[in-house]
């Protein structure tokens, strides 16, 4: 008997898949922390951001977004609004006595 037959295999090697597909898509769902839109990385190329509502995401993928671990980010529109708010705040600080 060889050592391989005596010791059970505890690990499995996953097939090679790009990091974005293995880490973000199946385990973490990017959700805008302001408006709640979900970035769809599965159906669109990485260079094209597509933001969907929870209902549209559920219909497109057959997955309930509430059952997946979420990571919070900003959609482009909310990010612009947050940037403008921060810029306005710092402008007011510099001009106030």
Image (cartoon, helix red, strand yellow):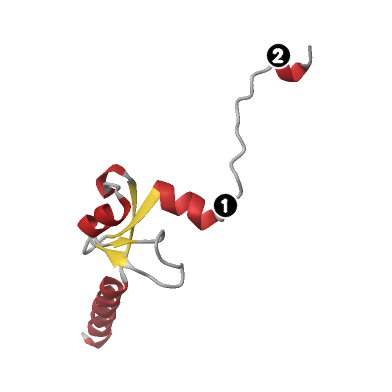
Judge from the rendering whether residue 55 lies leftward or rightward of residue 61; answer left or right.
left
- Comparing 18 with 36, the one in front is 18
- Report the disc number at residue 80: none
- Comparing 55 with 72, the one in front is 55
What residue appears at the point 26 percent right and 73 percent down from the top-left corner? Answer: 82
Total marks placed: 2
Counting from the top left corner in percent of width and height, residue 6 is at 70, 14
What residue appears at the point 49 percent right and 54 percent down from the top-left corner? Answer: 21
Judge from the rendering whether residue 79 lies leftward or rightward of residue 27; answer left or right.
left
Counting from the top left corner in percent of width and height, residue 7 is at 68, 17
The image quadrant of residue 4 is top right
Position of residue 41 relative to residue 11, above or below, is below
Mark 2, residue position? 6
What residue appears at the point 29 percent right and 49 percent down from the top-left corner? Answer: 62
Q: Residue furthest right?
A: 2
Instruction: Please state, as top left, top right, bottom left or bottom right, where the N terminus lies in the image.
Output: top right
- Comparing 89 with 62, the one in front is 62
Q: Earlier in the sequence, mark 2 or mark 1?
A: 2
Counting from the top left corner in percent of width and height, residue 61 is at 32, 53
Mark 1, residue position? 17
The image quadrant of residue 39 is bottom left
Pointers 2 and 1 in contact (C-beta within 8 Å)? no
Counting from the top left corner in percent of width and height, residue 95 is at 24, 88
Label 2, label 1: how many angstroms apart (C-alpha)? 31 Å
């Amino acid at each position: 008997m060889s050592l391989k037959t005596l010791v059970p295999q505890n690990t499995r090697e996953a097939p090679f898949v790009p990091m974005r597909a293995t880490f973000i898509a199946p385990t973490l769902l990017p959700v805008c922390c302001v408006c709640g839109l979900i970035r769809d990385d599965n159906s669109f190329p990485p260079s094209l951001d597509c933001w969907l509502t929870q209902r549209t995401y559920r219909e497109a993928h057959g997955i309930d977004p509430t059952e997946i671990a979420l990571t919070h980010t900003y959609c482009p529109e909310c990010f612009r609004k947050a940037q403008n708010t921060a810029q306005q705040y710092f402008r007011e600080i510099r001009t106030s006595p």
